[in-house]
Amino acid sequence: MHITTLTSKKFLVAVAIGLIIVILLATVPLYSPGYTVVLLSSILMYIVLTVSWVIFSGPTGYISLAPAAFFGVGVYTSALLGFVLPLPVVIGIGGLVSFCLALLVGALTLRLRGIYFVMFTFGLVELILNFVLWWEVNITGTTGRVVPTVNNTTVYYLMLITFGILLLTAYLIRRSRFGLALQSIGQNEDAAAHTGINVTALKTIAFAISAFFMGAAGAIMATRWTYIDPRIAFNPLLSFMPVLMAIFGGMGQLYGPIIGATIFTYLEEFLITRFPYYYMLIFGIIMVVAILYLPDGLVGLIQRLWKRISERKYAYT
Amino acid sequence: MKHKVLAGSFVLVAVAVFLVGVSATNSLAKDKIRIGQAIALSGPLAGGVAIAGGRIYVMWVEEVNKNGGIYVKEYGKKLPVELIRYDDKSDIGTMTKLLEKLILEDKVDFVFPPWGTAWLYAAAPVANKYGYILIGGPGGALKLKELSLPYFFQVLNFSETQAPALADIFKEVGVKSVAIIYRGDLHGVEYGEAMVPYFEKRGIEVKMKKSYPPGIKDLSPLLKEAKSLGVDAFCAASYPPGGMLLTGQAIELGINFNAFFITVTPFSPNLYRDTFGKDVVEGVMGGGAWNAKTSPGAKEFVDKFVARFGMEPDYWGGLYYWSSLQHFQQAIEQAGTLDQKKIRDIMAKKKFNTALGPFWYDKDRYFVNHPGEIGQWQKGVFEVIDPGKKRTAPPLYPKPAWPKK
């Protein structure tokens, strides 16, 4: 009895803190200077990419380097349909196209394991990039496209809503049998298959769900760029960033990638503006230190610190 | 549950710190003009920034400050200039974000352009949205005209004026047929498409027109194909990696044409002339162009640049950017204020004297008085070979064969 009230009290506190954060984020454009919204949009974009990456790669342990491909598909959807359809519809379509692409690609290739899968996903980015490039140069005779722009606040809210839906999806997957099955695939794929789990189907669906959100993020962010071409849309950097951010934050908990992406983006912004000529060096050192000393990411560090503090507390009392 | 609460409060604190951090803005008395620039200091474009254009902005700021700054009547004194540079990592998303940071958070007085056509394309609407003047630097495309942005000024010349000049030169020297290859991107496609009608109108046959993917490692099949067609002139719309590869392979295989033209690359004395040697590149044509003979101001600019950086400036845009900044400075001084709108109106209408001579923009805010369109390496000098009075030397045709190794 005592334990349950304690837990529910803590649960309430957690919910309250969550609510405050949501309210804070939702009202940012009302009181803060213009640039905060721009920066937060960019942070949210990286959070969306990282969390959606973790949906698939976290439990299954399959390292996917395909985010740039799905993001780029969303960007191109925005460029092609942005002038004819309302933005929310474009975002939905961007996500769906990525989803379908991931289903197709996943069904064909998720039988690959380990390094082969990593190689393939990275190849996918280049494959789509060069296909679009070939198409644009030889069929449509242009490579650059103009994307209709919207104001920064709209971009921010769209990104926030996408983030909210993604968070809910990720939470529900984690709590479901589906999530459990994914975890068992990550621990031992053969054993999972023997217990009757259709491993390929589940992996493919998880891959596609994560692609949906990457595509949606791409469709939103494209409106900030005005001009795109295949090299800009399918930027390999966006394949590596989510992986780094997830490692930095820690993948064990849902909030790990969120903290990782936030601090990573903010840190990068801070360093790039304060030390434009040295930031890469500083950034590299931070990454090396993080990987060497924080095997479970920032979340692991927080948990360890908390454990130490609470143990000391008990020791003194 | 415990650590969730902890993580939650951690995030809350982080959000709070973040909001406080970005809300704090500085308001100082006006003692300098702050100019922001988000440009590639790292990534694939950084090399281009270093050899073409990037240093001009640094040198202009130093030059202005050496003279005590820019006189602004509103403040009744000369204000020195401070250049705030951020690295866009050669990434468009980062560039637009940093440009907005400069405008919204750092509240700089003016902004300078990023490097590269696509980057310029993305930056122009952003600057325009906030009513910031953007004077185009390295980069330019016909497509930008379609956006018709009142605060955007195009400085560099591109296919629109270079393609007809090249066709005129070819007609003059008697080129009968050409082969065109172009990089599969905005730059390549635009030049590739633009050249054809001008050649055809002057009775020059286009025997081959092919694109190649950016990042290609072997262009020799295209060179051989053009050679087998027996064309007089070989034209390539490429960026430095392609331009260097193409020249290197043509030398290696001993494939010679009567005229050899590459849009971007030959203009660089450091990268192009000094890599291959001035005797080797004799007769190669490239987009540009100007040189120390263009005007007394141009000579002075080259000398200053060499004294400052120990190398020559690029002979495509160097003088263009330098002069556009001199025009800008005079517009500010005449406006007597740092108000963007007032300066913009003066810039759009007024003609000022600069290193290249009189400098003004047309009704689309495009700089028109180009010092030259097409250059050719002759005895280590990038001569302007346009027909007309801008010519600094007659075209060398046929181009001497690559020296035998």
Image (cartoon, rainbow, N blue to C red):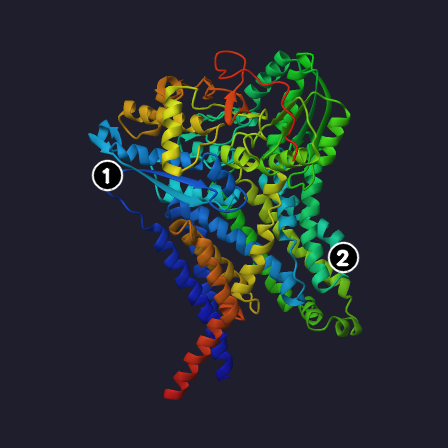
Query: Splitting the image into 4 quarters, where does residue B253 fall?
Result: top right
**Pointer 2 chain:** A
Q: Does residue A198 appear left or right of residue A230 in this picture? A: right
**Where in the figure is residue A182, as x and y percent of width and height?**
69, 67
Residue that numbered label 2 is attached to: A109
Which of discs 1 and 2 lies nearer the camera? The answer is 1
The answer to which of B379 and B182 lies nearer the viewer is B379
**Where in the figure is residue B298, as x and y percent of width and height?**
40, 23
Q: In this view of the protein, can residue A178 be seen by the observer?
A: yes
Badge 2 amino acid: Thr
* Mark 1 surroundings within 10 Å by alpha-carbon count, few (fewer than 14), some (14 through 19), many (20 or more): few
- Residue sitting at 54 percent across and 62 percent down? A257
**Where in the figure is residue B199, as x and y percent of width and height?**
66, 16
Q: Secondary structure at mark 1?
A: loop
Residue under disc 1 on the same chain as residue under disc 2 = no
Q: Secondary structure at mark 2?
A: helix
B156 versus B253 height, above or below: above
Badge 1 amino acid: Asp
In this view, the residue farthest toward the front is B405
Q: Does residue A39 appear left or right of residue B385 in this picture? A: left
Residue that numbered label 1 is attached to: B31
